[in-house]
Image: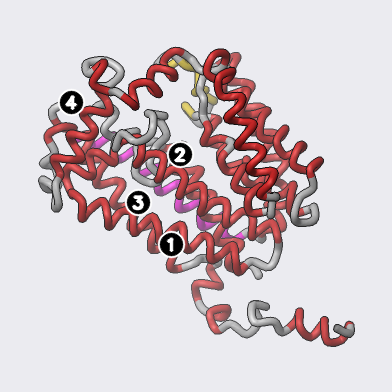
Amino acid sequence: MIPSQQYRFLRHGVRDGLSMKSDSSRWTKLHLDPWLLCFLLLNSALGLCVVYSASQDSAMVMRQAISFGIGFILLFTLAQIPPKVYQAVSPYFYLISLVLLILVLFIGERRLGAKRWISLPGIGSMQPSEFMKFAMPLMMAWYFSLRPFPPKFRHIVVAMLILMVPFILVVLQPDLNIGLIIPGIFVLFLSGMSWKLIGGAIGALMVAAPALWMFFLQEYQKKRILTLFDPESDALGAGWNIIQSKIAIGSGGLSGKGYLEGTQSHLGYLPEHHTDFIMSTFAEEFGFIGVFALICLYAAIIFRCLIIGLNSFHNFGKLYAGTVGLTIFFFVFLNSGMVSGILPVTGDPLPFMSYGGTAVISLMASMGIVMSVHTHR
């Protein structure tokens, strides 16, 4: 292809963003994607309703609503900033999150046997690992966007070091939070990492599994995994959560018991029913039909993020938007598998549904950057 033809192809390609009718729309001027915004509003409203049903605490619902409000304001603000700015500041986000994780080890608050929270003047209590979940895909997308695809082996080694440093800091809390490194792994996958390397990594992990079991997993983590296979062996102890969760899901039936009519959560049988096990509360009250509708709503959010990534014209936007969509899929799958007894109890929340301000705000911030990728062409 001669230079003039190549120039004409690049300037007038199907996806060049110049001939698309939607570019002159009001939504484009606001730098918002109407479909994604609609899905997020629906999911947020549904989350507030279920948090109220699970907790029966108006103050808790108000705090969650404030978190959603802050999140949507942040989403709108971040959507106005071009992706190239995020690409430039990504390393700084990563370093700040790394410093916060280090501070946890020294001034962290101990809750439920782990130091995962810190209190900062004027900000309040926060969980730095949630901010690292926001910073990690930015950092990884920045790193690989500056290098040719598929990545070379030395680039993958450096990327694994970027992943492992915060992961080790979180393990020291202690908290085996695999959700912290999953976004980075998705970036590796989307960047075109060789299937041979992926297979080799899985094989190495399987070989190292006995060492991980003996030296890295805490006793309560080992118990969670063992309880998965036989929860009835300790029905009043480690198996209680899974058993009560499956009872709640099964009692919902096809259409559920009705809003505010769930018994497992309202009578105190289901633990953490407004956070980790909020899906069980939802399933009991809305049944199979409600859960199917919720999964469809998540699928719409995930699909929209992937489409935005595919339509992006720069590698940073492709990697980041695709990673956000796949990360939401992972957490929905992980939480759903946990409450239904097919995966170990990990304590990871259900996106946009579980109570927790830090997780909501970081998720909304991620969506703001995805919208920026979509509208800044």
Mark before the other along the chain sequence, 1 or 3: 1
Closer to us: 273 or 191:
191
The residue under label 1 is 37
Disc on the earlier residue, 2 or 4:
4
Residue indicated by mark 2: 359
Q: Residue extending furthest right?
A: 3
Tell me the element at label 4.
loop
The amino acid type found where label 3 is placed reads Ser
Q: Examine the rendered structure and indicate whether residue 220 appears above or below residue 16.
A: above
- Mark 1–mark 3 Cα distance, whole angstroms, equals 10 Å
* Residue named by callout 4: 269
Q: Secondary structure at mark 3?
A: helix
Displayed quadrant of residue 243: top left
Total labels: the figure holds: 4
Q: In the image, is 112 to the left or to the right of 278?
A: right
Q: Residue at x 60, y 69 (%)?
A: 311
Residue that numbered label 3 is attached to: 44
Examine the rendering and report whether any part of residue 303 can be seen: yes
> Which range is magenta?
56-80
What secondary structure is found at the residue carrying circle 1?
helix
Q: What residue is rendered at 76% in x and 50% in y?
A: 151
| Image location of residue 38, percent across then percent down | 38, 63
Alpha-carbon distance for marks 2 and 4? 25 Å
Q: Nearer the viewer, mark 3 or mark 4?
A: 4
Which labelled disc corresponds to residue 188? none
Q: Quadrant of residue 360?
A: top left
Residue 69 belongs to the span the image colors magenta: yes
